Image: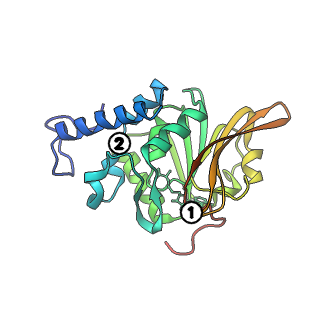
Amino acid sequence: MMAQTPGNSDNTDESSDDLRVRMIELIMSLRTAGIRDTKVLAAIERVPRHLFVNSAFSQRAYSDIALPIECGQTISQPYIVAYMSELLKVSDRHKVLEVGTGSGYQTAVLSHLARRVYTIERYRTLGQDAEARFVELHLSNITAMIGDGTEGWPTKMDFDRIIVTAAAAEIPKPLLDQLRPDGIMVIPVGVAGGTQHVVRATRVGDELKFEKFHEVRFVPLVPGKAQQL
Ligand code: SAH
């Protein structure tokens, strides 16, 4: 269900029926593109993506495309959000860490799949805007912070699942260290602006197993907190 129901005020000019139709079309296109996990599709369906983009782009919020957000970053394409969420195999018992909050769209999708989501963003503007959306949408199982996600969560927690939504040249070791036994991490690996692939790391006992999936194009994972806001 989308957040808008007839009679509710919302901040677009479109009727909730139009938004509902667009959402159904988006879900159908994700199915056609190969997303099979019904829990992931249901989670996508619960997140009103038009609230995560600048109003100038709200007409295209339910198209399966990435769009620009503040600070020169992007909100991921819904297919990629669905695809990476599927690879992550999240259950409602899981504590998930996300690096790269951005608009908060992927975070919101995960919040419907996981027990709790911790998310880190290096730009204060993005982190604060995302947090305002979580409050507006009553997503109470998200903890957001501003910082450098390549260092992992500062209080050194163990996570069942870790997702990175920016491309890394190499998987940051502090993140692998925060992955608990049987934990799974999904991260785009490769050069910024060049070829990147989604990699899934699974902790099996003392070993890590790596699998390579789709080619993708993400903004780079940049170490350190952003100097500019
Ligand atoms: N999941 C987001 C995608 C945002 S793009 C969404 O659905 O909208 C990736 C984000 O990662 C950007 O906002 C960028 O600022 C952030 N990022 C890059 N390096 C980071 C780091 N070291 N720590 C935290 N966030 C980082």
Is 162 placed above or below 204 here? below
Does residue 196 appear left or right of residue 86 in this picture? right
Tags 1 and 2 in contact by the CB under 8 Å rule?
no
Image quarter for residue 121? Answer: bottom right
Residue at screen point 66% across, 61% down: 191
- The local secondary structure at tag 1 comes to loop
Q: Which residue is mark 2?
A: 137
Does residue 4 appear left or right of residue 229 in this picture? left
Q: Residue furthest right?
A: 206
Q: Which residue is mark 1?
A: 122
Residue at screen point 32% across, 45% down: 62
* Residue 102 can be seen in this image: yes
Is 159 placed above or below 126 here? above
Where's residue 9, x and y in %? 17, 44
Residue at screen point 83% across, 30% down: 205
Residue type beneath disc 2: Leu
